Image: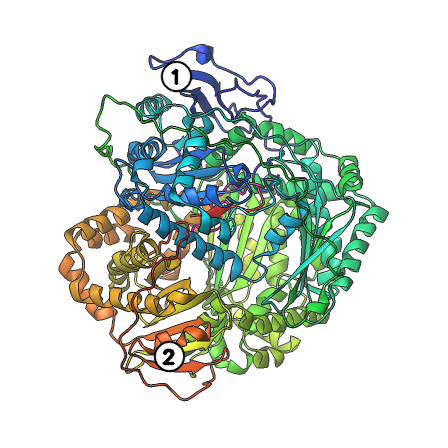
Amino acid sequence: MTRNQLLLLGLGAFLTAAAPQAASAQTKAAAKPAAKTASATKATASGTRLVEKVTRKPGEVVIPYEKYVLPNGLTLIVSEDHSDPIAHVDVTYHVGSARETIGKSGFAHFFEHMMFQGSDHVGDEQHFKIVSSAGGTLNGTTNRDRTNYFETLPSNQLETALWLEADRMGFLLDAVTEKKFEVQRSTVKNERGQNYDNRPYGLASENVSKALYPYGHPYSWLTIGYLEDLNRSDVNDLKNFFLRWYGPNNATVTVGGDVKPAEVVKLVEKYFGTIPAGPAVQNMKPMVPTLTADRYVSYQDNVRFPMLQMVFPTVPNNHPDEPAIDALASIIGGSKTSPLYQNLVKAQKAVQAQSYHPTSELSGEFTMVALGMPGKPLSELETIMRASIDEIAKRGISDEDVARYKASTEADLVNRLQSVSGKVSTLASYQYQTGNPNRLPIDLKRIQSLTKADVDRVFKQYVLGHKAVILSVVPKANPELVAKADNFTVDKSNFKQPKDEYAGLKYVKAKDSFDRGQQPKAGQAPMVAVPTVWKADMPNKLKVIGTQNAEMPTTTMLLTIRGGHRIEGTMPGKAGIAALTASMMEESTEKYSAEQFDAELEKLGSNISISSDGDATTVYVQSLTKNLDKTLALVEQRLLHPKFEQDDFDRLKKQTLEGIANQNTQPVVIANKTYNRLLYGQNDIMAVPTSGTAATVGSITLDDVKQFYQNYYAPNISHLVVVSDQPQAAITPKLGFLNSWATKPVELPKPVASSKTEKTKLYFVNKDNAPQSEIRIGYVGLPYDATGEYYRAYLMNYILGGAFNSRINLNLREDKGYTYGARSGFQGNRYAGPFTAQAGVRADASAASVKEFMKEIETFRKDGITDEDLAFLKASIGQSDALKYETGQQKAMFLSRLVEYDLPTDYVKQQTEILNNLTKEEVKTLANKYLPEQMYIVTVGDKKYLPELKQLGYEVIELDADGNPVAAAVAAEPVAAPAAAPAPATSDKKMKVKTKEDGKKDKKKMKSDEDGSKEKGKTETGK
């Protein structure tokens, strides 16, 4: 089980629910009868049957919904929630990589990519464009057991989302071409390179899976698949995969938000109802592996810290023992009170250590992992890990251990249910796993009834004295650091080829009485309400701003203390002190040791974290409102009474220095460091990483940290944002402790003139054998201005590199297959920040990618945008406001921006006016002004591709990873630039890229469980 997937305690009674009638192959035996309405047996004129209706009574913890089954087997779940004017659509197909076979891995994920490439009535690349122009967001993800596609958009655009999803369910295959197949195969290969092959420890899960599961087991390969399997696949393989698994009878459509169930049913009947059912799909049975001996395996990687991972086979998700094993993982290695942290991290034997328990449909994996110190054998870590297990056996599980786990999981679920997407994905996940969307009360009861005896029993049943896979990941220069010599090889002798699932499949399209080629018209645009704010500045000049959010019983606080890394400009020899001080603030206080503090937070299910970035130190507080008083007492300790002990300082300083030494093993970090050095020059602290350097951190003492805290943690340069279900009158008295925070004479740094280049030069850093190259192109641009030139520049860039359908991303990813995603954007705040175009690209396309980046920027500067581009820009940005203020965290960020930049509460209206009045001519003028011909180009990659880069016509300067020249500058060679390298014969997946107008990047939809479901499926890959 995933901690964020279910879990909720003490929030009220729950509605007993039963698994509805089996509607498709997704339905499993489960549960007891759910409350149903009197109409639960009735069917619509089209034959759609209402299976159940679950409502919420006062004090109950359920997600209300209605569940229907269409005659073709499609399951429909509708959850009505009018708290925000948005709708979320999720289409989950009960097929993941577990349905693949030996030699054909990666098909489920590959096909997810293909589902975004157009269908009979939706043009190439139009799926993303249509949703984006509707003001929405979208993506898809694949894990071992399921694939899902989802959109969040203004509620008046619901019909458009359903039209799009139905068209690719019923009308995809004739639009699948060989060219699209090859481009997406290349994209998938780029994704594998970026997220697995070129990422430190990226192949750990692949090696564990091969060793833990028998050859041919559905979990013995990763969702991303093997390159050789992708290379040998052809377009017909993909089409057959679709025909076998993508029928409506193997799918669930879940719709939530500002919708009416009856209207949703009619729309789903219209667009999905005529799609023919596919072949029957049977649920797979659990296949938990059995180990008779410890299996030692290892591999070498470009890493500094050797890693040890121990994995014990456990139970599938929804197994009765799952909650107790989850709790065990939290107790052994989930907090500062855990044995793994105490014995490894606190003892300075490892830089990181934790345990967790991912589960999937067929099996589960109790996992312990630690990153050891450089040069130290992993056998030492293994000894300590096993001793930590023995420590639990000796001391036993306590009632307090279990109580802390229950409280923290309660908060996890409450926070997850703040968004419509969180509620929808929860319902969809329960449906495909169990056939019962109303599992939440059942899981709640499982957690509430958990005892220490349950945890002790599963500890002995699955971990203590049991065999495991032990993976060693060691630096290439130190193969001798493995825990033990490999003693396991994959045995293929017992493998039996499964039956052919793909024989005789036929493609039958729906027959309709309406024209599917007509895109639905949007309904009346919803009214979007900007949060109503209150202000209560304090006598010590701390600015306080808040809003009431009555949707969930939670409180979010965000304290911003200006300064951060930038204030280190007055003490460049101590660079990194802001980050180190923030880390020290999370250790002991005058009243609590670090472990005691962590335990108190767990009891409350609260979070208090402190971090420092380029311009500020941030204190983030999340609490159930019922626990707010106790949480704020802990905030007072952490913020106003840190203890700053020498042992904590010595450990954190050592960890920081190790982290700095590790930076040059990562191409992404090398690229960013090199780029910042060039942008800002020697006289600006922003040229130095926020972590500092080995020399600067090495010079920092505990007294320096104490002095930094005393001088620069001040209320008069801070602002506090509060988002709570409680009104201002209930909140402000609770903040009285902050009155004792004394003002200080802090002078914030003034902007430093940035370094400018007289001509475009290319700076190259070698990273031997890197399968991908990291590219950064740009210059120092503008400070943030919500209604001025910065906002206009953001609008200008949207078509160039800010949207998924931007010129840059469509060229490098969709047309050429060079990258998993490319983007550009401005990142300013009170100080001028960079304009950056960037991507991680296929190594052999390094020069071609730089060429295409520069061509797109130059063409954009020269030609500007089209009428169609302008219409898309206005529609996409103009309709996106409905999605901006849904969760407490979103509201907190909005309020924080108001205070940080002294903005009026109606500044969004001013932005709307600017957007509505934008012209093509203004965009072209802005492009010429803010896309200069002179920019820095940084490329980090394998030196064997350097000759091609030298042919691009730029002066090439080679640097080492620390920014030092390694050779004399190389004049541009008068040779024609290389032609764009063709996409190789294998594919990739979609990544959603969108840069927000304040310069911060939205999450790239590349990670596991990007729909927010955080399912316990081990590996999930997103578009």
Query: Horizontal placement of 328 versus 799: left or right?
Result: right
Residue stretch rendered in magenta on the structure:
1005-1015
Residue closest to the eye, 387 or 175: 175
Dot label at residue 48: 1
- Please tell me whether residue 1004 is drawn above or below residue 759 in the rendered image: above
Dot 2 amino acid type: Val
Does residue 589 appear anywhere in the picture? no
Q: Residue at horizontal 37%, vertical 79%?
A: 752
Q: Residue furthest right?
A: 394
Magenta stretch contains residue 1012: yes
Dot 1 amino acid type: Thr
Query: Horizontal placement of 366 versus 77: left or right?
Result: right
Q: Quadrant of residue 325?
A: top right
- Please tell me whether residue 501 is drawn above or below residue 929 in the rendered image: above
Q: Quadrant of the N terminus?
A: top right
Does residue 439 appear anywhere in the picture? yes
